Amino acid sequence: MVDAVAGREIASPAVLGHKDMMQTNSKWWVRLALTIAASTVMWAQGTPAPQTPQAPRFTTSIDFVSKDVTPRDAKTKQFLPDLKREEFALFEDGVEQKIESFALSHGGRLLSDITPAAIAPPAGIILPSVRPPADTSGRIILIFIDDLHVEFKLTPRMRQLMKRISDLLIHEGDLFGVVSTGYSSIEQDMTYDRKRIPEIISKISGAGLKPSELVRAQSTAEGPAEVRYRANTAFSTAYGVLQNFDKITNRRKIFVYISSGYDFNPFPDARQRYDAQTNSKNGSTDLGQTDPNNVDPSLLSNPFDTRNNTFSFADLAHELSELTRQANRSNVTMYTIDPRGLTGGPDMDEQDVRTAEYLDNVRTTQDTLRVIAEQTGGFAVVNMNDFDKALKMIDAQASDYYVLGYYSNNPDPLKRKRTVEIRVKRPGVELTYNKEYTLKPPPKPIK
């Protein structure tokens, strides 16, 4: 997990995506560009052009990296809030780094003093009272509701889950926002106002496809087209939100990801049976006539007509890896929650899918939620009906931690994937932190 800002650390904005801040930054960059352009023209007019070719020059930037680490006593598993900066040692790819910033959060509040020191006014000048700086000691919590991958029948459970999140996870001083992927159309900007939560809850509505709809959906060479479209919508939305966290440092960033998971090739056997019945030459029924000897119609179809979904798992793994890489670059911990809870089998009206096929799909989708959480330092809440217990675990893990910041002096600046190791001098301490991060890919050259 990393906050990488080329060259220097950028202070945390109180609200993500603030239009005034974006306009101010844009005007500042325009003025800077015009100043540089004018200086270049004046220099070019007064300086003769060089006659000899210049050797190429290569420059590198120094990235500021912050890592969250949770130390606990190896025997009691209790958080240790009394560690000092000098007791930590941090290494990147085996090279020790100098810890530039050090902050402790205990009980969800930063205890380190990060308020800039006041400057005394000159003698004889009376200045207006200074507005106190915005409180930056709370956490930042983003609730991501992937309603495109939660069935409509789970709407009451999702609303109850959101209510419990507001009661058990979002505390006073926490900056929170809510985003949905589908028809719920929720886009709550980051706010401290907890009074907005009831309105958000009333908008939540599941819009996921049922198993029978997945089986009967129009298929392509890559499986049901609707499946990939919905997954790409969810991933791109989450990726965009994670990018907005890049500039925020020294605050715990929690990403609660509510979804039933992903499978690019759902119920392949059921879809094959349905295709075989639909394409049967006997049109006495809407689904075609099965063999009179009760032979599975999929066995009577041409095997070379079967659609190839060999790379569906590889494609899904690639998209998940891109999402988790961005979360690690932004130093965001993701916790995934499956609103289905404990699942025993398909509903009685789902005649197209057999129980074994349904459970296999559940395992696949839950595995994707585990990957998202475990690759970013969090955990997945799957096969669990006691959401209160899970939310209390998330709250505890996200409330007690240290933030260590450093400027990377990696000897290989071209290496994108980097390994981080944190040690403490005190014996009998267990550390929990994300052990690697990936640099942003270089910008594509302009053609």
Image (tube, rainbow, N blue to C red):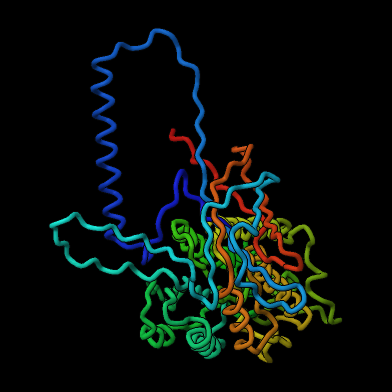
Query: Residue placed at 29% from the left, 61% from the top?
Result: 19
Say if 209 sits above or below 236 in the image.
below
Closer to the camera, 274 or 280? 274
Say if 308 sits above or below 256 in the image.
above
Query: Residue placed at 55% from the left, 77% from the top?
Result: 208
Can residue 141 be seen in this snapshot? no
In the rendered image, which quarter contains the N terminus? bottom right
Say if 128 sits above or below 385 in the image.
above
Query: Residue placed at 54% from the left, 47% from the top?
Result: 407
In the rendered image, which quarter contains the C terminus? top left
Q: How many marks?
A: 0
Which x, y percent locates residue 313? 70, 60
Say if 440 sits above or below 126 in the image.
above
Query: Furthest residue to the front?
Result: 123
Which x, y percent locates residue 209? 57, 77
Asked whether, in this view, residue 8 is left or right of residue 94, the answer is left
Residue 290 sits in which quadrant? bottom right
Query: Residue placed at 55% from the left, 62% from the top?
Result: 403
Asked whether, in this view, residue 302 is left or right of residue 417, the answer is right
Which x, y percent locates residue 293? 86, 81
Closer to the camera, 282 or 234? 234
Can residue 53 be seen in this snapshot? yes
Query: Furthest residue to the top?
Result: 51
Which x, y percent locates residue 353? 72, 81
Query: Furthest residue to the right?
Result: 293
Asked whether, in this view, residue 270 is left or right of residue 52, the answer is right
